[in-house]
Structure formats: structure tokens, C-alpha cells
């Protein structure tokens, strides 16, 4: 989803965290804090601007509050080092209560590198990050979030329990139990829940992820937050899951869909139901879903939102959908988009075919034409380098095809090194290596000289860290704690992760 408005410009002197919290709460609209219920803290291991742009985080908060639980929020401070220097203690936004004083913490983890934030929020709350160092007076720690769809094992040393997969139906019971029951009774309860994982009992044998009943869908985030990355945007889930089969993707049908519905794994929300949930005060609406652009009602939905004078956002766009339904590009532009963003994912048609990615050069060219016709500033194309079996010829094709797109409209290639994820057909592939990825990036940049094409690449070194964590077990989590303690620079991560024994770097492989 694009970021149409940057967060508020930081003042010249860093404000105190409690000032940040007070200002942000005063700016927020929507949502309601429940007083008098069981008290829990929901902690996001990244700063406020990211946490409040997470539909999952907002939705869990809402589910808990709907159930009468007094759920308060806390976030990783914007500047962790400054917070430490000031001797700060992590507190909740709603009441300023120290996070360490709550009986139970719920933490949402989105991706591998946020494991560092998980360690930091616990430390800043005065809670020993490792479960084995905590006692009966410390809060119980329950973890969920997108990372649990793939490989949550590195988080195991830090938590008492996890809810794997869709926690819509289980999070209330699990959090209530954490507050009200003895530790063993609570862990018994979590073990019995779909997706309930208790590291001290299950070891590295993960139970199947949960699939929520559709009763409570769609997820929505009722709080409009001006300082969120998705500033002031009402987030609502237009569909859940994906009916496509891309072999590198955690969201493919085999993971989240049931294959029984007519849309083959997508759980659709009707446009009418969706529109009925949009609050009057919401001036911007973000439609969320792994395959939201495949929603058959999307053009009508966008039209209705644009006609009501609202800005719109979508969490992802498929190039073939834009090619076949160019009015989606027109409507997004009318709803405030300046960048048309699609994914190509692999350098050549051969690799895309191998990875079951249906995008073709013809689709991308249609996107470039739509971007030009509707006055977008740039066409952004997401791409991975270092995918299995990638050859020089594939890179040559990428250079040629990008030049062809750039001849139609300015292009920005958003490049991420390929990281093999667990629970995908490519989870036994290996990371290409930082040197290989960097060499290919260099060749790509050289090949695009003079074209209206910019290469924006994420770090190959941090992709290596991500790959180690995506495949690693609890020992990789202990390495995260050591890396954070050693200052958190890349060298510290490399030293800590390389010290993990090869058999512990992907324990599930050793176990067969
Ligand atoms: S990459 Fe996109 S289209 Fe492919 S399976 Fe994942 S969510 Fe679906």
C-alpha cells in the first residue's frame, strides 16, 4: 500500500515518549478504550507509525475490546537508544502504566527482523526477554502475527505461548486465560486451541496453523491515526487468503485457503458489507488482502469510495488484473495514488513460470501504459534477485524488459533478495549469498544506465539475516538476543548467527 502522506515532521528536539503518546492519542479518532475489564497490554515490536498501520494489530485490539478486555497499547520507542539513555520504562499509551506491571502481554510479530524489536520491548519493559529467566511475578507473554504462518521458532525462547495462524477466534480466550488462570492451566488451555503452540511442551514440533471461522470477518482497524504510516486511513479486510500458487509465497492457497470456495481459497467480503463498515469520519480507506486486486467487486468498491470523496488504498495489486481491468488503475489514481505498484517477482518469464507467478511482460507493459494514461508519477515493480536457478540470461531479460517499460513510463524497480520461507515449496532452497546478489544488482544498474528506470534495493546483508531467521530454530532466537546485546549492528548479527550450530540453523530439516 502506498504511503501518501509522511508522518508528522519530527521536532528539532526529540520529545519524551510520554509526550509522543499524549499527542498521538489526542490526534486519534475512532476506537474505544474499555475500562474495568481484565487488563492486558498489546505490544508492537516496531514504532507506533508501523504498529498503527498494521490491520492485524488493530484488529486484535478491537477483538479484545469487543470482549470487554481492557487492552492497552505499547510500541517500540521511535528512538530506542535515546529512550535507554533517558532511563525510560516502556509504558502503555492509554494509561501510562508500565508494561511490566501487566499480568499478560500480547505481542504481534510481522517479520523476521522484528525479532530484535521483540527482545527490545521486553527489555525496555523491565521483563527478562528469555522465558527461562522470568518468574511468577513477570507478565505472561503470548505471541501471534503474520510470522506465525511461516517460521515462528526463533521467537520460542522469548514467549510462554503462541497462537499460530489466524487468531481471530482464539485470542480472547487465550488472553483471558493468561490473566485469570494458573500458568499450567493457561498453557493447557492454549495447547487445546487451534494453532496453540507452547514451546516448553511442543519443542520444535509446530502444530498446524489455525484457520478462523468467517463469522467475525472482515478484520478492521477502527482507529484513525494521523501519525501512522498509513496516515488517518481506515483499514478493512476486503478478502482473506490467496487463490494463486506462487511457490515462494507464504500466503499461497495451500497455507491459508481451503480450496473449497468458488474463489479457490480467497474468502471474500461483499462490497456492501464492506462499505457499511466504513465510518463517516474516515476520509481514506485502505482495502487489505493478499489478493485484494483479484476481488471481483473491487472496481465497484473503489468507484463507490471515490464517489464518496474518499481517498483509497489497496495492500497489493496484480499486474494481470490491471492489464485486464485498467479501470482499477484509473480509480486508484482518482483516490490519491501517485505510484502504481505491481509485482513481477522474478527476472525473466522462464523464472516466473517456474515459480508459478502468472505475470507476463505483456501485463507489465499494460501497467506502464495505464500509469502513463492516468498520470502516475512512476510505475513501481517489485522484483526478487537471487531466486533459485537464476542465470545471466535471466538478468539480461530483466534489463531488456525494464528498458521496454521505461520507454513507456518511468519505472522504479523495488528489489529484494530472495529469502526462502518455510511452509512454501521453495523452503528448501538456499539464499543466493550477499556477493552474488550484490554483483547482480551492480550488473542491473549498469544495464539500466540512461533508461528512465531507478533501482531501489533492500540490503543483501540484512536479507542474509532474514534468511537465517526464516529457516532457523530457537537457537537462532538466542542469537538474536546476543546480537541485540552486542549493539545490533550487522557484524554483531553475523557473529551471533554464524555461531549457531549448523544442525540448529534449520532444525526442522534435520528432523526430516
Ligand atoms: S505472491 Fe501474491 S499472488 Fe502469489 S500466492 Fe502470494 S499473495 Fe498470492
Image (cartoon, rainbow, N blue to C red):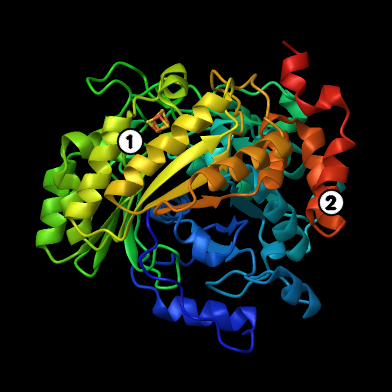
Q: Which one is nearer the viewer's eye here, 135 or 510?
A: 510
Q: Which one is nearer the viewer's eye here, 331 or 277?
A: 331
Query: Left of 228 or right of it: where is 176?
Result: right
Residue 356, percent from left and from top? 41, 20
Return the residue at label 2: 491
Would you identify the image quadrant in which residue 206 lies?
A: top right
Element type where label 2 sits in the image: helix
Residue 85, percent from left and from top? 80, 78
Residue 169, percent from left and from top? 43, 37
Question: Quarter for ligand 1?
Answer: top left
Q: Quadrant of the C terminus?
A: top right
Q: Which mark is first along the chain, 2 or 1?
A: 1
> Looking at the image, which residue is at 44% across and 58% down?
53
Return the residue at label 1: 291
Question: Which mark is in front, 1 or 2?
Answer: 2
> Looking at the image, which residue is at 49% across and 51% down?
449
> Looking at the image, which residue is at 33% across and 35% down?
291
Could one spot residue 210 in this view of the protein? yes
Amino acid at each position: 500500500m502506498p504511503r501518501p502522506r509522511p508522518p508528522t515532521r519530527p521536532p528539532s528536539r526529540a520529545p519524551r515518549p510520554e509526550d509522543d503518546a499524549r499527542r498521538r492519542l489526542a490526534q486519534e479518532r475512532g476506537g474505544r478504550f474499555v475500562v474495568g475489564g481484565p487488563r492486558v497490554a498489546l505490544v508492537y515490536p516496531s514504532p507506533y507509525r508501523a504498529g498503527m498501520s498494521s490491520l492485524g494489530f488493530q484488529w486484535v485490539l478491537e477483538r479484545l475490546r469487543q470482549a470487554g478486555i481492557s487492552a492497552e497499547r505499547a510500541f517500540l520507542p521511535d528512538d530506542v537508544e535515546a529512550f535507554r539513555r533517558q532511563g525510560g520504562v516502556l509504558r502503555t499509551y492509554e494509561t501510562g502504566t508500565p508494561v511490566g506491571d501487566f499480568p499478560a502481554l500480547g505481542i504481534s510479530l510481522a517479520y523476521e527482523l522484528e525479532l530484535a524489536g521483540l527482545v527490545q520491548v521486553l527489555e525496555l519493559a523491565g521483563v527478562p526477554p528469555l522465558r527461562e529467566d522470568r518468574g511468577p511475578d513477570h507478565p505472561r507473554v503470548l505471541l501471534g502475527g503474520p510470522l506465525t504462518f511461516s517460521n515462528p521458532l526463533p521467537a520460542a525462547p522469548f514467549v510462554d505461548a503462541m497462537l499460530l495462524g489466524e487468531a481471530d477466534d482464539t485470542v480472547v480466550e487465550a488472553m483471558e486465560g493468561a490473566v485469570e488462570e494458573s500458568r499450567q492451566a493457561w498453557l493447557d488451555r492454549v495447547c487445546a486451541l487451534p494453532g496453540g503452540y507452547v514451546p516448553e511442551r511442543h519443542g520444535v514440533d509446530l502444530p498446524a496453523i489455525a484457520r478462523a471461522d468467517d463469522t467475525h470477518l472482515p478484520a478492521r482497524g477502527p482507529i484513525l491515526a494521523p501519525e501512522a504510516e498509513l496516515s488517518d486511513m481506515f483499514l478493512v479486510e476486503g478478502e482473506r487468503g490467496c487463490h494463486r500458487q506462487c511457490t515462494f509465497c507464504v500466503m499461497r492457497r495451500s497455507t491459508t485457503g481451503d480450496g473449497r470456495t468458488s474463489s479457490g481459497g480467497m474468502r471474500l467480503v461483499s462490497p456492501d458489507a464492506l462499505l457499511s463498515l466504513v465510518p463517516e469520519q474516515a476520509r481514506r480507506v485502505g482495502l487489505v488482502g493478499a489478493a485484494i486486486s483479484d476481488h471481483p467487486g473491487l472496481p465497484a468498491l473503489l468507484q463507490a469510495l471515490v464517489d464518496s470523496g474518499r481517498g483509497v488504498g489497496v495492500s497489493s495489486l496484480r499486474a494481470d488484473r490491471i492489464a485486464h481491468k485498467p479501470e482499477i488503475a484509473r480509480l486508484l489514481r482518482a483516490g490519491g495514488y501517485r505510484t502504481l505498484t505491481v509485482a513481477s517477482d522474478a527476472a525473466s518469464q522462464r523464472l516466473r513460470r517456474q515459480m508459478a507467478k502468472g505475470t507476463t511482460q505483456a501485463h507489465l507493459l499494460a501497467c506502464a501504459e495505464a500509469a502513463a494514461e492516468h498520470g502516475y508519477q512512476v510505475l513501481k515493480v517489485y522484483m526478487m534477485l537471487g531466486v533459485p536457478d537464476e542465470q545471466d540470461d535471466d538478468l539480461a531479460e530483466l534489463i531488456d524488459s525494464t528498458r521496454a517499460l521505461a520507454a513507456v513510463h518511468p519505472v522504479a524497480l523495488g528489489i529484494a533478495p530472495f529469502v526462502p520461507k518455510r511452509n512454501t515449496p521453495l523452503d528448501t532452497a538456499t539464499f543466493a549469498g550477499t556477493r552474488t546478489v550484490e554483483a547482480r544488482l551492480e550488473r542491473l544498474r549498469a544495464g539500466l544506465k540512461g533508461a528512465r528506470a531507478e533501482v531501489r534495493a533492500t540490503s543483501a546483508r540484512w536479507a542474509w539475516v532474514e534468511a537465517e531467521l526464516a529457516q532457523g530454530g530457537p537457537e537462532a532466537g538466542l542469537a538474536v538476543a546476543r546480537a541485540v546485546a552486542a549493539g545490533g549492528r550487522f557484524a554483531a548479527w553475523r557473529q551471533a548467527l554464524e555461531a549457531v550450530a549448523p544442525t540448529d540453523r534449520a532444525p526442522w530439516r534435520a528432523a526430516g
